[in-house]
Amino acid sequence: MTSHRKICVIGLGYIGLPTAALLANRGYEVYGVDIVQSTVDVINEGKIHIIEPELDTFVKSAVNSGKLKADLKPVEADIYIIAVPTPFHEGFIPNVDYVLSATRSIASYVKENDIIILESTSPVGTTEKVKEVLEQNGVDTSKLSIAYCPERVLPGQIMRELVENDRIVGGITSEATHKAVEFYKTFVSGEVLSTDARTAEMAKLTENSFRDTNIAFANELSILCDKFDIDVWELIKLTNRHPRVNVLQPGAGVGGHCIAVDPWFIVNAGGDDAKIIRTAREVNTYKTEWVIEKIKNEALKFKVKNGRKAKVVCMGLAFKPNIDDLRESPALYIAQRLTKELENIYCVEPNIKTLPKNSQFSILNSQLITTDEAIKKADLVVFLVAHNEFKDLNIKTNLDFCGVTR
Ligand SMILES: NC(=O)c1ccc[n+]([C@@H]2O[C@H](COP(=O)([O-])OP(=O)(O)OC[C@H]3O[C@@H](n4cnc5c(N)ncnc54)[C@H](O)[C@@H]3O)[C@@H](O)[C@H]2O)c1
């Protein structure tokens, strides 16, 4: 492995930049590539364009030591790591365009014995497509090691988990698997597990679908318990005393760019055979609509009783507790829908000062208030995200969809 010292990381976002900075701090000569000029510029100044604890220290020391350089174009290297986005198109069709264009961008640089690793969460068969695209661009892939290695880090703990988590590595050939495993072993303290590329791709999708399905079970229970006039939080606490039962907590839906997205990659390819995974997605999406209807009904009851429209405060906008990430957030979606359909909607999000300007949700900025203001102003308090700041509030709770007041 000592001959493989030069690494090119394609895509410098939440996964690519921490990976590049870690490898540079471990002595590799790392070239980071991104298509966004401002991202490249910020990194070359030793600074970061995303929020992640400890990342700034890693990037600063990597750039200062000359081991990390960013650019818009790839360079010749020994190992290429692709960590670009894999969203979906309209209709939940997986979009691997970024992976394919990143692959095309390295085609003229790869040479015999290089290792090419795809880390983006991808539909089964994408690593084979990487090989095909290289071949279509004139590359002889017979002497290359092409492998898939999914990332499973938790935002907020990425620098630690990049090293400590177990990794799954699956090559197109067993030699590719072996070479990629040897590479990960140079910086991962967790176990590095070998398989083939298709199994590794499916493993990542399975992990996120498992979470989605289990949350869907809890969300369905919460709707049923509401119908049966049972406190779902007490119910779950009691059932979890069974030694082999562990029901998760319900919420306002499921968000984030992983769990709410990746199961569709299985459903899209699995068709009618992906019954539970599809239904789980639908249940979690339905839960968000159900929450909106509940809030609207409560607001209507207030109006009938008091002769005026309720001032509604949505507590939390992020997609899960104690973060500022709004991607695919059900709470944000609920606040947006209520703003369109009702009046006097306010939001509290202790992890965000202002919402990004020119974004589809910057309109909510004028409705952002503090928790203290919410306590004074609100007729209807709706807890959507179980942030720590909301735990011991002396507020008369009207609706708690995340169990934070329990
Ligand atoms: N963020 C996470 O917590 C996490 C966890 C596990 C897996 N993943 C997966 O990792 C992949 C990357 O996710 P992310 O969160 O880092 O995304 P991101 O959006 O933060 O970063 C991706 C970067 O790739 C760049 N890019 C796009 N096309 C490019 C190209 N052709 N060449 C060079 N750069 C290009 C973008 O400009 C962006 O900076 C996705 O498949 C995601 O599902 C993410």
Image: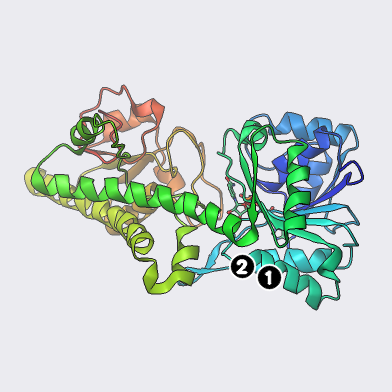
Q: Residue at x 45, y 59 (%)?
A: 263
Q: CA distance from mark 2 to mark 1?
A: 6 Å
Is the Cβ of the residue at disc 2 closer than 8 Å to that at disc 1? yes
> Badge 1 is on which residue?
129
> Is residue 121 visible in the rendered structure shown here?
no
| Residue 1 placement, left or right of 55 | right
* Amino acid type at mark 1: Lys
Q: Position of residue 54 (x, y in %)?
A: 68, 29
Image quadrant in which the N terminus is located: top right
**Residue 370 horizontal/vertical position (percent):** 40, 31
**Does residue 66 sit above or below 285 in this rendering?**
above
At a point 36% along the width and 38% down the height, the residue shown is 385
Query: Which amino acid, by three-letter code, is at mark 2?
Result: Gly
Marker disc for residue 164: none
* Label 2 sits on residue: 125
Does the image show residue 138? yes
Ligand 1 within 8 A of label 1's CB? no
Q: Residues within 10 Å of mark 1 (few under 14, many from 20)?
A: some
Colour mapping: rainbow
Q: Give the side of residue 360 with respect to residue 222, left or right.
A: right
